Structures are given as structure tokens and as C-alpha cells.
Image (cartoon, coloured by chain):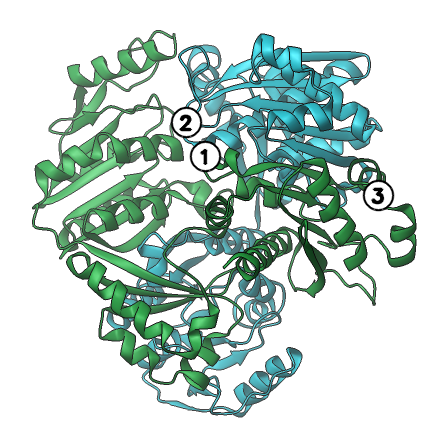
Chain colours: A cyan, B green
Amino acid sequence: MITAQIFAIGDELLDGVIADCNGKNISLWLRDQGISVQEITLCRDSDDTLKELLLKASLKHDLIITTGGLGPTKDDRTKYVLGQLIQKPLKENTHAIAIAKKHYDRIQRVWTKETNDYHLIPEGVTPLENPLGLAPGLCTLFNDCLILSAPGVPRELNSMLEQGFPEKLDEHLSSSRKKRKSIIVRTHSIHEEEIFFKKGPTLWEQLEKFGKVSSLPTSTGVDIHIKVDKDNFESHEKAIKELINSTFLKDHVWQFGDTSLPSFLIETCRKYGLTLSCAESCTGGLTSSLLTDASGCSDVYMGSAVTYSNDSKKKVLSVKEQTIKSFGAVSAQVALEMSLGALNVFDTDVAISFSGIAGPTGGSREKPVGTVAISVAHKQKQQSKVFNFHGKRVALKERFAMKGMMELLLFIESIYR
Amino acid sequence: MITAQIFAIGDELLDGVIADCNGKNISLWLRDQGISVQEITLCRDSDDTLKELLLKASLKHDLIITTGGLGPTKDDRTKYVLGQLIQKPLKENTHAIAIAKKHYDRIQRVWTKETNDYHLIPEGVTPLENPLGLAPGLCTLFNDCLILSAPGVPRELNSMLEQGFPEKLDEHLSSSRKKRKSIIVRTHSIHEEEIFFKKGPTLWEQLEKFGKVSSLPTSTGVDIHIKVDKDNFESHEKAIKELINSTFLKDHVWQFGDTSLPSFLIETCRKYGLTLSCAESCTGGLTSSLLTDASGCSDVYMGSAVTYSNDSKKKVLSVKEQTIKSFGAVSAQVALEMSLGALNVFDTDVAISFSGIAGPTGGSREKPVGTVAISVAHKQKQQSKVFNFHGKRVALKERFAMKGMMELLLFIESIYR
């Protein structure tokens, strides 16, 4: 098995300024390449620490990928540390100069040696093009370990995963990689304990016959991952589906696969020829934003009304003054009128609406923070329910949005399947 | 200096299934506690690896925080590894039983020893309450190092950072922590190189007199962080402001501080007594969702129309058929009518609108993927411009949204300041 370690370099990652999302993208990419990531390490802009960590990793793994520390300022240390590691001085590199000029040409600026030090590279290190940025990437060989370095800006890193890094993997790492792939059983409305202890005490062992099993509670429910050899994927997937469909878990599976809930909802609408709209209050547009993350959603998703104020609920969605007065803005009744309003305004087949309290203020004893009314509507049939969740504002918005999309998915399946 | 290492445990973090966001929250929390995080390590559910990593970290640092691996399934290894580390067997723990019963009571379920193994804890390890979840946290002392363990579910971890972990820090770590705080100079519309090489070649050194400097390109522009001793924060902040305001950088600073752009925009609107609405097409509700992440935004933010289809642009925002026909949906003209539509529908003082191509499909030679028309409107004055960005769909949505909010912020400041 070819193994890898990923480094994300930068004080900002350890001072709580930003979270690293590059590690996830690189891991996913390497998984598809048949390479197993053993560790992701976030570390400071410190020469000594970084050198020691890279040295140790190079002795354990076939591949190291670093992100960050390639920019022009003094806290960017990666190439200096690579030079120390391979004990080579930094020198002018004609290839690096050509790359720098090309990058700056692209954004209609002129690069010279005074602009920055992008032309200086440790001897023996190869500069790589950066299709969406300015700082070049680097390719280093050390201790029989391939070290690929990209900037920390996510879109730059991602572009190098498509162009630059794949060529270097093929050049330097054995092609006999054993590719693995996960079969994912995504469930809703059932706890881990109910699945693996109460109702299916032998399920884990049964699944383990196919590959390594892991269980992951997510915002939609419990996802069960079974990692299998890629060659067996189809036969194992079929067998696992049959196994699951012969158990209690059958009624809790919403998907065999790894499509996100918003994308799966868009696909399901498309399958049944349905158009979709939303009416959002407490979720503030999050549901709409998640739905429109799905590329090509415009044949299904028509639009949303984010009606934060009561006035806009009345004006845009025709929610009745009297309904708000009688039941409060956070009520099944108002949510129902909102979803019907969305059906009408956007002229869609189905709609989903949210009215709730994301907090931290605005809660009461009767309707505490975390209360949300969610309505799903179809021209012939509607439902509206009130749910309660725990958590903080931003997390609650996500839980509300995910719950609503799951409600709509199950609602559509109940009508059309 | 008290130092710490954070571990995020779980195969899902290394197979590209999910990104770790706990590390950022813990780092931020520890920074405020005067503790410096030296490394964040994401590792697999493997007893041997985890034991080795924890052992090494315990020899280097005063504090270890682990997240993940505390659930009830077989891939949850944390407490078993802690037992191996301190060489103590797992035993029934009456305190753990009391905690489990309390947690299950809260969600109206009954915990018994058959439910799971939450009652088994390594001897000498203290169970901790988990205010928003079921699996108890753990507190372990080993090699003079305090090890605090929380589940990986972010809201559960976050609740333990508020309750449970602080008490253990105070109990076991010296109170003479030297607290540091960052002064952040947030700039827009200027490159790192222009700041530190072309226009301000001595600026880095001047800032370094106050504390450690780092430079971070973000989606709003370059942020400059200066980490100072907390005791000097106010005097240093004043001096840094004076320094910056005496240089070319003055016109590029939009904030001294670490408020997010959406929250800062809400605050700015509030300062000038302005209400705000949006009209979104390609951004699909993301701008609205980011604005409503700010707690208490409801006095400023009234609502948004997410008009993905042309029909909804006409129906909800009164965009003219002829304007779409003449200039296309992605045009300064349509964006302008959208922002005026939002002003009118939501009856607000200012509005912002977006119409663009987030891709990957829908681009043309004239209007490639990444093109966005952004209009900002006030009753007396409007502007509408077309911008071009590079990147993929989800990243482009974010860049569009951030650019639009920055445009509106500068627009408001140009009118009211």
C-alpha cells in the first residue's frame, strides 16, 4: 500500500483564524489514486519544527503533500525548509522565472526579480505551474519520498490536483496501486445504537466480510462506510444492498452512495419531473445556497423567497396577518402558508419552507431556541411540522436546512415512488 | 509558554469524507486561554498509531485535546487507547453511569448497560458531561500532561469547550498563562507584493516591533495579523492604527479587527440606520445565508429574493423582459433592475444584487464562467459593474458573495462617511 502524509502549514491554522479544508480535498483525490493518507498535520511557520516533521514523514511514507508557505512574504517558509532538508542552496531557476512571467502575464502584470523571490528555488527542486495563482508549486525528491508542495489558497491547490500533481504521481510512484472505494449506506431517523446493538447486533460483522466498516453520524443521519477493493466494487455493492434490504434497516436507507442531500434532492426532483422552490426565514437562504451548489440545478430549482421580516412574509409570500397574529411567525400554520406562497410565486411543483428560532436571542419557554416549523408542499398535498434541535446559531441553521431537505425528499418519495 | 497539541481522530477525516472544523474552534478557544497550539494532527482509528502519537505529544506539551472516537461503535477507539497508554484496565465507573443515565434522560430514552459501553472507563480517568450529546468526555493525566477528550460532533465539542473543559484547565494548568491577542489589519484591493515590496518595503519590520507578524490572503483581501501580549493590546492597537494611517495602506483598510465581512456589513448598516435586502441569482442565497449568520441581524436584514429562473426575476423583482432580451440575464443592466427590485419588494434603504455564471456550464466566450454582474443600490444612487473571477462553482459563489458585500460596504461608506 502506498501511503501519504499531508501537511498544512501556517500559524493562521493554529491560532483559530481559519480551518484547513485542503486536507479533505487532497485525501479524497489521493483515495481515488489508490493512495492511503495516514496523517494530516497542521503546523506552524517554523523552520525547525517543519524540518523535523518532514524528515520523519519522509522516512515513513512514499508521498508528502504540503500546502501553504509558498507566498512572497517573510512568514512563507516552505521552500527554505525544503532547501535545508535536502541540504541544497536556493538558486535562480530559469524554469521558475518562465513560470513566474507566465503567471503574471495571465493577470496583466509584469513580473521581475524585484517583484518577489519566485525565481529562487533549492537546487534539484522542480517548480510547478499554478494554473489559478502566482506562487509556483514545487516537486522535491528526498529519502525516496515524493514531496509535492502547493500554495494554501484552496482554489490554487485544487487546480494543481487537476494539473501538475497527477503527472508527478505517475512519474514517480508505482502504478500498481491497489485502488479502494467506499460503499456508503446512508440512513435517517435511527441511532447508531439501535442499528448496531438493539436491532442488528450482528450487522457490523456481516458487513465486515466485504471490507473495513466505519460508522459516521452526520447531519442527515448515520452513514455506514464499507471500504472495498475497487475491483470488487460492483459485486460487493450488489451484495451489500441485498443484505441491507433484507433487514430492519431497509426503511431507514435514503441512499446507497455519496451524493450530498441537496444534490440527491435535486436529482430526485429531476427524476420525477418536479420543479422546486423554497421559502426561508430562520435558515436565511442557506437551503437555497446548498441546493444551488449542485451544478446544473437550474432545470429543477427556480428560486426562493428569504423572508426574514414579517412584512416580507406577508408581501412576498401572501402569509396572512391573522395567521401570524394567532399562531406566531414560528408555527406550523405560518410555515404552511409560506410553502404554499413559494409554490405560487415561483410556480413550482414542490416547495419547502422554514420558520424558526436560530438564536441566540428570540427564544421563549414555549418556543425555545432551536424550534423550527418546516412545511413541505405539493399542489395536492402538504404537511407542516414543528421540530426541536439543540445547538448554536450557525449549526442550527444547518440542521434546520438538512432536516427540511430530508422531509421534502421523503415526502416526494411517499407520493411518487 | 503553555503549549498544546490537538488530535482529530477518525478514518473519515483521512478518506476525504469530512473536513475537520473542531481544530479551528479549539485553537481559537485555547488562544483566548493563553495556550499556544503547536500542532493539529488528524489520524486514523488505529490503536497503535494513536498510542504512539499521544505518547510523543504528552512528552512535548502540557495539554492534549482529542476529538472523535468516543461513540459506541467498534471503530471508536479513544478510551481503549487511553487505557493502553496509562496501562490501566477499563472498569465500571459509577460517575460514568450517572452521566449516561442523565444524558439519556434528557432525550427521553433509557440508558442501561446493554445500551452501550459508556459505563466502562479506564481506571483513573474521569468522565465528563456532554451537554449536547450522549457519549461522555474524558479527562486523563499522563506524563504531567492533561488530556481532554471530546466527541467529534462539532456542537458537542463546542459545548464542552464552554462547560467541562474550562474547569479542568483551571484545575490542572498553571494560571500564569501569558495571554496573547492579535491585532488584525484587514485590507482590500491590494496585493501582498504591493503592500510589502513595492509600496511598503519597511512595513513588515515596522510592524514586527509590536509582535509576530503574519500575512494572510483571504476572500476579502490581505489580512495582516500582529500577535501582541494581551497586556499591551490597547496601546499597541492605537500605535499600529496610527502607523497604518500614515501610509499608503490607509485607503485599503476596511477594518481593524476580526469581524467577518457579513457581520461588519450588518454593523455598518446599523450604524447608519440602514435596512438591507438582496437579490441573488448565481449566488443562490449564499449572501443572504452569510448575512444571517450574524446574530441579531433582523433589525437590519429584511430578506432576499433568490431568483434563479428568468421568470422569477421578472415576477418577483420586476426585471423587464426587454432588458433580459437586450443585454442577457448576466449583465450590469439586469443586475441594476434586480437591486432596484429588492429595494422595492423588501422596502429597504440599500440592496445588493448578483447575476452571474458560477459554472461549470453556462459560460460563453463573451461571458465565461466566473463572470458576475453586481449592483449595489440606494434610493438616491446606484452602481452596477461586471467582474471576472476564476475557480470552481462553490468557490466562485463565495467569491461573488464576498465581492458583492465588499462593494456594498465601500458604497455605503462613500455615501455616509
Determine whether label 1 and label 2 are within 8 Å by CB.
yes
Q: CA distance from mark 1 to mark 2?
A: 7 Å
- Of the two numbered discs 2 and 3 in the rendering, the one whose residue sits closer to the viewer: 2
The residue located at (61%, 19%) in the rendering is A374
Q: Secondary structure at mark 2?
A: loop
Q: Secondary structure at mark 1?
A: loop
Which chain does the numbered disc 1 sit on? B
- In the picture of the structure, the residue carrying the numbered disc 2 is A361
Q: Secondary structure at mark 3?
A: helix
Q: Which mark is residue A390?
A: none
> Compared with residue A15, is residue A257 higher up or lower down, i.e. above or below?
above
| x and y percentages locating residue A356 in the rendered image | 53, 22
Determine whether label 2 and label 3 are within 8 Å by CB.
no
- In the picture of the structure, the residue carrying the numbered disc 3 is B310
The amino acid at mark 1 is: Gly
Determine whether label 3 and label 1 are within 8 Å by CB.
no
Which chain does the numbered disc 3 sit on? B
Q: CA distance from mark 2 to mark 3?
A: 37 Å
- In the picture of the structure, the residue carrying the numbered disc 1 is B296
Residue A106 lies in quadrant: bottom right
The residue located at (83%, 36%) in the rendering is B315
Q: CA distance from mark 3 to mark 1?
A: 33 Å
The amino acid at mark 2 is: Thr
The amino acid at mark 3 is: Asn
Question: How many discs mark residues in the rendered view?
Answer: 3
